[in-house]
Amino acid sequence: MPFYLSIKNKDDVILKGDIPSVEFIFKDGNDEKTFNDRNDLLRILSTGEKRALYILNIIFEVEARKKDDNITLFVIDDIADSFDYKNKYAIIEYLKYMSEIDKFFMFILTHNFDFYRTIQSRGIVPYPQCLIALKNDSGIRLEQISYLKNPFIRDWKTNLSDNKKLIASIPFVRNIIEYTQSDENEDYLLLTSILHSKNNTHEITLNDVKNVFEAYIRNITFPNNNLDNSIRKLIFETAEECLSADEGINLENKIVLSIAIRLKAEEFMKSKITDEDFLRDLENQKNQMWQLLKKFQEEFNNEANNIEILKRVNLITPENIHINSFMYEPILDMGDFELRDLYDEVKRLNG
């Protein structure tokens, strides 16, 4: 930080017990300026520097309360926001230090799932005390957190008889193939044809998915019933089930709905676009949804309502579908109600 603090009346603090009088010394290269008024300093600091000063004040307060042996309840709200990883983890280590002081108690609030997961894994907050706030028309309620650790590893791959978890696992397995093989791998391309509307999408069966899963995931139990059924049909049937699910984080619901939404949106656009050469070349192109949307807008620029719906599909669904198996938390903070509404709208596009 470009500033440091100095106690002007050290002798009086030590000898007479006076309240410390703090001055702030700001350094920028060879220039140095002393501020006796904290507000004067705040006017020249950036947002991050102001937060650092705020945290420094907290540390002073914590240490004073520890010295006085005071029972204290701290409410800590998004304390690590806007900091880089080095400083964020320094804050986490200090929270760990605070959690080990007998007379200190903490409520830690955050919107950052990575921060949330880290304070649990570092032993700052035990898992049973990790809660999430859910808000709906009837109010706000607290529930035990789920998906705190990778759901594919700890839940989905051993519960593939649940259609939602089976379908939601497809992007994870596709990630694994991309990381270990390449995005030109045949199995990767087959799973891509489930996540996008391709010429062979209608032909892909559960048995095809089973063969891919078992080739890349050890000790997996894939359900053996209805293996000749279409995976596309199962996706749409399962999406309908998601519409009536209870409210919550519903990570698998979000992924299933997003896959179903984009499939229906792409099928709609492909059924309308008249440029056969474009559609034929599209099979081997990346960013298919974006390219279809661009072409649809060119050819049907008078269909403003449909274009608006399709733009929402392109905006909302990619992060839910192309989910990184190690960094999935960005989609946890979003409710699935918007996806439910969007799925209904896209269904109406297809009549």
Image: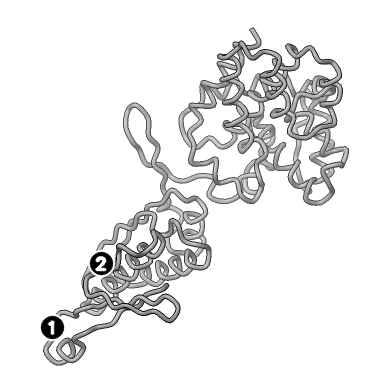
The answer to whether residue 274 is above or below residue 27 is: above
The answer to whether residue 54 is above or below residue 34 is: above
- Please rate how many residues cluster around mark 1, counting C-alpha atoms within 10 Å: few if below 14, some from 14 to 19, many from 20: few
What residue sits 74% from the left and 22% below the top? 232
Q: With 129 as the anchor, is 226 left or right in this view?
A: right
Q: How many discs appear?
A: 2
Residue 263 position, x and y percent, is 70, 23
- Please rate how many residues cluster around mark 2, counting C-alpha atoms within 10 Å: few if below 14, some from 14 to 19, many from 20: few
- Residue at the limit of the structure toward the front, as seen here: 31
The residue that label 1 is drawn on is 18
Q: Secondary structure at mark 2?
A: helix
Residue 254 position, x and y percent, is 57, 32
As shown in the figure, which amino acid type bears the numbered disc 2?
Answer: Asp
Residue 22 position, x and y percent, is 23, 78
The picture quadrant where one finds residue 101 is: bottom left
Q: Nearer the viewer, residue 156 or 115?
A: 115
The answer to whether residue 46 is above or below residue 160 is: below
Q: Secondary structure at mark 1?
A: loop
The label shown at residue 40 is 2
Q: Nearer the viewer, residue 209 or 311?
A: 311
What residue sits 37% from the left and 56% below the top? 108
Question: Which quadrant does the C terminus fall into?
Answer: top right
